[in-house]
Image (cartoon, rainbow, N blue to C red):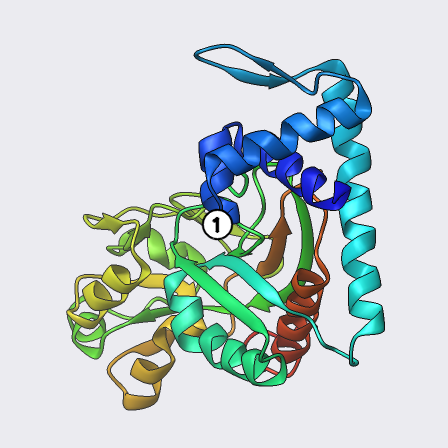
Amino acid sequence: MIALWMQSFVAVADAGSFSIAARRLGVTQSTVSKQVAALETHLSVRLFQRTTRSLALTDEGSAFYESATRALAAIDEAQAAVGPKGDVQGLLRVTMPLTLAESRLIAIIADFLEAHPRIQIDMSLSDHALNLVADNIDVAIRVGRLVDSGLVSRKIGLARRVIVASPDYIVRAGRPIVPTDLQAHNCLLYTLLATGARWGFAGGQSVSVSGNFKTDSPNALRIAALNGVGIAVNARWLFERDIQSGALEVLMPNHPPETMPIQAVLPSGRHIAARTRTFVDFVADALARDPLCAID
């Protein structure tokens, strides 16, 4: 029973709300309130400071939170250990960029679900970085360097990027040969790129570029390039079919853009369930066999 009380306590602490915790656990708010109250009675301490407008952990609550998350992780490990090999179960909430999901990860997830039929996946697709705690995300797959150092990350692959343009654009504006040539071209800007309008290349060179079109959508970037608006840079998987069909051409193959890490990102301070670790390992193994994503 105490494990159930602890689960409710950790859910409330993570959510900062009894009602949100109840919704995430799939129970009533009254049930969560009673379980937390029972835990406080059992421990003879107050775990939360409650007012009509706020909810915060007490000093004792903060200390107990660390122990509770470790205890829940140990329980999860113990249950996995006595079940059939690889028998993980439960709901796994994941988030990842749309184009990476469509081109690579959904196929990998299909294989994962076949291997682990007792797992349920709840997937959020966004090119923006969601708040893992506020949105109750178990694991995020992200491309690029992390800005939030408070998160736990594991590098599971590399995004190999290319610079592309349509044949029509190349006929009209010419073909850049070296990175500095890009300064004379209309470059399409992806606003979620951490380096902004400065494009980096293997070997450490970087060039400031400019253009008349920018977007936070990789697919909009691709469509603009297909329509001859300008030169684009992004992960090769975004353009692969267009490159194969000849609708886009790879530019400056001797000066490839710098690669970007693909990372599995986890909330810090939260116990990591066996199903989450199993999922991350599975995705990492699959990407290691993908020539567009494998780590050198």
Q: Left or right of 117: which side holds 224?
A: left
Is 82 placed above or below 93 here? below
Determine the residue positioned at 82% across, 44% down.
71
Q: Left or right of 114: which side holds 223?
A: left
Q: Left or right of 113: which side holds 199?
A: left
**Whole-percent x, y for residue 69 in the image:** 75, 41
Determine the residue positioned at 84% across, 72% down.
82
Q: Is residue 130 visible?
A: no
Is 259 placed above or below 116 here? above
> In the rendered structure, which amino acid carries the disc numbered 1?
Gly
Determine the residue positioned at 56% across, 30% down.
33
Determine the residue positioned at 49% across, 14% down.
54
The quarter of the displayed image where residue 141 is located = bottom right
Q: Secondary structure at mark 1?
A: loop
Quadrant including the N terminus: top right
Tag count = 1
Quadrant including the C terminus: bottom right
Q: Farthest bottom residue?
A: 245
**Whole-percent x, y for residue 28 in the image:** 46, 40
The quarter of the displayed image where residue 259 is located = bottom right
Where does label 1 land, which residue?
A: 26
**Whole-percent x, y for residue 210 in the image:** 29, 46
Along the line of sight, the residue nearer the viewer: 22 or 266: 22
Along the line of sight, the residue nearer the viewer: 97 or 277: 277
How many residues crowd around disc 1 within 10 Å: few (fewer than 14), some, or many (20 or more)? few
